[in-house]
Amino acid sequence: DTEVTQTPKHLVMGMTNKKSLKCEQHMGHRAMYWYKQKAKKPPELMFVYSYEKLSINESVPSRFSPECPNSSLLNLHLHALQPEDSALYLCASSVQQGSYEQYFGPGTRLTVT
Amino acid sequence: AQKVTQAQTEISVVEKEDVTLDCVYETRDTTYYLFWYKQPPSGELVFLIRRNSFDEQNEISGRYSWNFQKSTSSFNFTITASQVVDSAVYFCALSVAPFNAGKSTFGDGTTLTVKP
């Protein structure tokens, strides 16, 4: 099973709302990633978790708060977002952190109003 | 610093044509990995291939083939007898081991449209 699932598929939120994105994989991968992708652009790395510990934070604003409750789950908590945060948010996993192929979920399309 | 250039922004072909997507990379490191991902309209990136810098053998997988040439720093991707389902954005990516720790540099992508 090479599937990464993400919920919800679509999310519309106001700038004062708090919401969470969820990601799950059951491949036994020990590295998980959050990416942000704007239209017609490549994905931009936000966070990397390795063995459930935050390994990389690409200077992401604090209104994005990641969490890795266990080796299969990855959350992204959203609070006080701005309209420019509207994008496709992709989760990915790989066997370990490093130069390994990443398996991506279908993404959550976020609109901030 | 690393860089990946996909000079072709958009390509349009008719079904059954062969098409080559170009990828040129820059790195000073001797150990690195190159990837191709496909992103169909549904949104998720699909892993296609991973190649390390010490393996210059070309690879074929069904209608897909990859040509890796270190001399020209290129890792080109050819689809033979293209099909409508091949329509997608294709990203080439570079990862330098081990210091980049999973951070990949992506090209800007090539949008391939295959018309019936």
Image: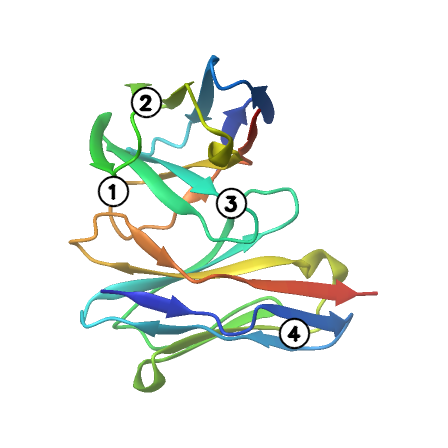
For marks 2 and 4, give the CA distance.
44 Å
Who comes first in sequence, dot 2 or dot 3? 3
Judge the density around disc 4: few (<14), some (14-19), many (≥20) Cα neighbours within 10 Å.
some
**Residue A62 showing in the rendered view:** yes
Residue on which the image places disc 2? A65
Instruction: Please tell me how crowded label 3 is: few (under 14), some (14-19), or many (20+) other residues with Cα within 10 Å.
Output: some
Q: Is residue B8 above or below residue A22?
A: below
In the rendered image, which quarter is residue B23 located in? bottom left
Quarter in which the C terminus of chain A is drawn? top right
Name the amino acid, label 3: Lys
Q: Secondary structure at mark 3?
A: loop
* Mark 4: secondary structure: loop
- The amino acid beneath tag 2 is Ser
Disc number at residue A97?
A: 1
- The residues tagged by marks 2 and 1 sit, at their Cα atoms, a distance apart of 20 Å
Residue matched to label 4: B80
